[in-house]
Image: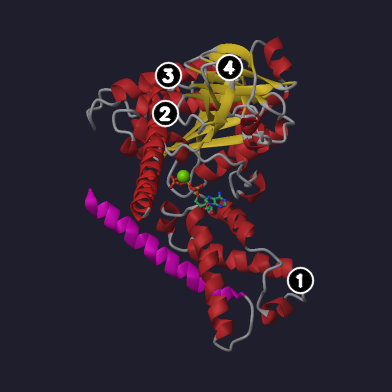
Amino acid sequence: MADTEDTIAALEKRNGELQRLLEVARDHLGEMRATLAEVSAPPQTFATFVQWAGKNADIVSNGRRMRVAVLPVAAEGLASGDEVLLNAMSVIVGTAQPERAGQAAIVREVIDDDRVLVVSRGEDERVVILMGGDAAARVHEGDTVIIDPRTGFASQKVERTGVEALLLEEVPDVDYSVIGGLGDQIERIRDAIELPLRYPELYREHSLKPPKGMLLYGPPGCGKTLIAKAVAHSLGEATGSDRSYFLSVKGPELLNKYVGETERYIRTIFERARAKAHSGAPVVIFFDEMDALFRARGSGVSSDMETTIVPQLLTELDGVEDLGNVIVIGASNREDMIDPAILRPGRLDVKIEISRPDAAASRDILSKYLTAELPLDAGEVAAHGGDRSATIATMISASVASLFHDEASASYMSGALLRNVVDRAKTRAIKHHVGGGDKGLSTAHLLAASDQELREARSVAAREFGEY
Ligand SMILES: Nc1ncnc2c1ncn2[C@@H]1O[C@H](COP(=O)(O)OP(=O)(O)OP(=O)(O)O)[C@@H](O)[C@H]1O
Ligand SMILES: [Mg+2]
């Protein structure tokens, strides 16, 4: 009896062990099955979700439009343009990371809330759908987006650090009123550039071709860049469009950053300008220090780069014709170095010299920086019977007389120098006041600043002269 009980106990124990082994084996089997299922699962296909069609979804997979079913787990929050996964039965089973690579295209026009017209590969135009709800609000003409040519979706815009970074494009807030002493030049510029934009039909009637651009040349610091900005600003008003663009390209910067690629970037600049101009907004392409880029061919000054860059610019200039609202402005201190082909009729044929200011022009420039609202020396204002404008006029006269006292100073006078005089005088006035003196700008501050500026300009000129 006792024997039998022992046997039963032993058998029960074995039974328990066997059961445990069985469980372990089953777990193993399960794991292996899962692994087998994982490795032998048919591949899932990527597709782009377009829109809902009832409970089904319209998608584009491999360039094919399809209507497919959606697993409930994958359905939540699906938005057009999302990347989804299809199982072997072409059912949406999940979502995937969006595609990050693709073809770059430039936005030419924002059509509506979610569609834009883009150009890619030269002149290939197509309409693509922007992903993301408020996408269209964030994309503007001239931006670069990634498109998937097969699905017609564009993902978010690409911030480019290449040539785009060299292009400054906000509308400059400089208008003609801040420029002093260049009245005649400004009038010529407005006639050459604004008239054709305001009255295109008159130009057609008279079969007069509007100029494509102009060259501003003259010594440094006399207002070339300032004028180019003012042109861009006023073009927006002249054409009645609320916007205008200013693509500014600095010659030496472009050369240094893109050795050997400059032609391509010149092409990109014009492509971008055309895209921006497409909406009707005027675009100014400004080549600063133009002589660095478009040096006369065969001048032997540098490598042979000008033999390819100059023709590239000529090609682009000749192509600007179809778009009246792209204007090219070049600026240079050395117009004699620029390839003459660029300055021939039909190209940058309007040449305007921005010369050094004489005494009268200097008065005008100073009056832009010295205004009656500034804190003025109370004694001087009182001496003018409280008339602040008259006080300013006297201050300006005294400064100009002192600046032009030496005949030679006319040869280094510039708008930049005059502005510096005023800034320095203001600094003196502030220091004087902070140090316990009376508040306000005085003639003495201006005269001291003039003196200091002239002395520095003279020594710079002497140093430059010494180098030759
Ligand atoms: N005619 C002017 N009226 C008012 N301010 C001027 C004038 N000319 C120059 N200035 C002042 O000098 C600064 C430099 O001028 P600007 O950049 O237009 O010179 P620039 O002719 O382009 O010189 P650079 O050849 O060195 O590029 C301006 O920002 C402005 O403050
Ligand atoms: Mg300049």
Residue at 24% across, 25% down: 304
**Whole-percent x and y of residue 266?**
42, 26
Magenta stretch contains residue 126: no
Q: Secondary structure at mark 1?
A: loop
- From the viewer's perspective, tell me whether residue 313 is left or right of residue 285: left
**Whole-percent x and y of residue 290?**
40, 34
Closer to the observer: label 1 or label 2? 2
The residue indicated by pointer 4 is 60
Magenta stretch contains residue 449: yes
Give the magenta range: 441-468
Among the two numbered marks 1 and 2 on one chain, the one whose residue lies closer to the N terminus: 2
Residue 314: numbered disc: 3
Among the two numbered marks 2 and 4 on one chain, the one whose residue lies closer to the N terminus: 2
Amino acid carrying mark 3 in the image: Leu
Closer to the observer: label 2 or label 4? 2
Residue at 61% across, 29% down: 141
Residue at 66% across, 65% down: 393
Give the answer, above or below, for where 363 lies relative to 231.
below
Closer to the observer: label 3 or label 1? 3
**Whole-percent x and y of residue 176?**
64, 44
Labels 3 & 2 near each other (Cβ < 8 A) = no
Residues at marks 3 and 4, CA–CA distance in whole angstroms: 43 Å
In the foreground, 9 or 304: 9
Q: Secondary structure at mark 4?
A: strand
Give the answer, above or below, for where 147 lies relative to 237.
above
Residues at marks 1 and 2, CA–CA distance in whole angstroms: 91 Å
